[in-house]
Amino acid sequence: MSDVLFITIGTLIDGSGAPARRNVYLKTQNGTITAIDSLENLPSGIIALDDLTHCTVVPPLIDCSVSLCLSPSIDQSVRRTSRQGSTAKKAALLEQHVHYCHSHGVLGVADCDDTEGLVKLNQSTLSAENILEVQSAGKAIGSLDEYAAGNWHESDFLKIRYTKNIEDQYPSAQSMQYEDLYTILQHKGEKKAVVIANGEQQVGEAVAAGCEAIEQGYGMGEANLTLMAEKNVLWIPSILRAKNGLDSSGANGEIGCRFSTRYVAPGKAIPGAEAFWKKTFADQSLLLGLAKKRGVKTAIGSGAGNIGILHGESVVEEMKLFIKAGYSLEESIQCGSINGAVFFALKRLGSISVGQKATFLVTRGTAGQLPRKLGYLEDIYVNGRPSSAYRKNPVKAVQ
């Protein structure tokens, strides 16, 4: 007998960017959604029924820029361990970060900086157990020599460092020549390429060379937005990295703010740092708002694994910044779910629609309490059933 289940829902945000729908039901069969309709049309006499009418349901979240093997700690000794420690310690850190992602409803990620192949090694197991669907770039390519080494052949997509990261001293400084970038992009085959690029000229060159996505894109200017819209290039703005830089700059270099948790930022204030980050954050917020108006497809990529950017919860923090930049709640959820799922071909994840797997997040209350309540999930459904890996109130181990 087929496994048929009806799920009644108070508010549904399906991930398409469309307005939220009130009082609907899902019909699922063997874990796949076969119908979505108003509660007024719910058939009578149903035996298998899950009641979520007191809840809001949204698609699983996708983080398009993650380093699962790196620690976001501000303690440099901890960060060194994540880069130089034993394989066993790195594996334990990976497991911890995977758990953080799942517990915050991030069920899909695009990973980078997997220098030892640990993410790739665990990829199939994580997917089979419905914990986390991962697309891995392995180690990012920073030169033509690294590309020629051929390690990228086993990756799911290419991550190319065309410029430095926004946190570096000269973020628009190129890591490779344009000719080298062009060569890589013209010979990569069917794999999609995400290029880290900052600066107007550098982003324009990356788009012209044929990349499928730009990550960061700080200071790229309005003309590049128009070009990206024309060429259907995805933008992963990683705006949380600028907010994090601003928060941790601090007035005196000692105290910063990472979301709602205060932490000690080592060292003294760097002259001009706070002014730099204020301008950088404001400029990126303005560009993000313009990207929506210009029709540029955007996606959430938190940069988790960088200092102060935690795995899992950072996706919601970046969604808040999208909303402040002019996106509606529904549009920000689209950027944090279906846009990344489609780009990275995460087949088990995506919108809540007929034909898709019934995999979604459940929050108690109304849509007006989002995205904040996404940090306190009521439940996670995977293939039509509550996830065995998620615990709303986990039992702490006895010390």
Image (cartoon, rainbow, N blue to C red):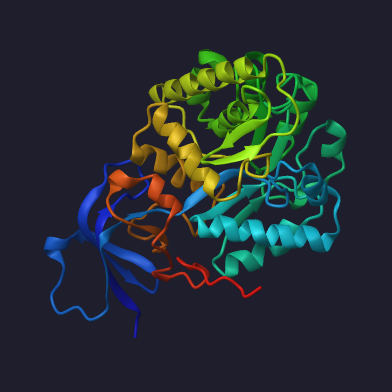
**Quarter of the rendering occupied by the N terminus:** bottom left
Residue at the outermost bottom position: 1
User: Image quadrant of residue 245?
Assistant: top right
- Residue at 59% across, 26% down: 246
Residue 360: x %, y % from top left: 40, 59
**Quarter of the rendering occupied by the C terminus:** bottom right
392 on left or right of 181: left
364 on left or right of 336: left
- Residue at 87% across, 42% down: 149
User: Image quadrant of residue 66?
Assistant: top right
Residue 252: x %, y % from top left: 66, 23
Residue 294: x %, y % from top left: 42, 21
Where 122 falls versus 17 (above or below)? below
Number of numbered discs visible in the structure rendering: 0
Q: Nearer the viewer, residue 253 or 192?
A: 253
Residue 227 at least partly seen: no
Residue 260: x %, y % from top left: 51, 41
- Residue at 54% across, 44% down: 314
Residue 34 at least partly seen: yes
155 on left or right of 390: right
- Residue at 68% across, 51% down: 68
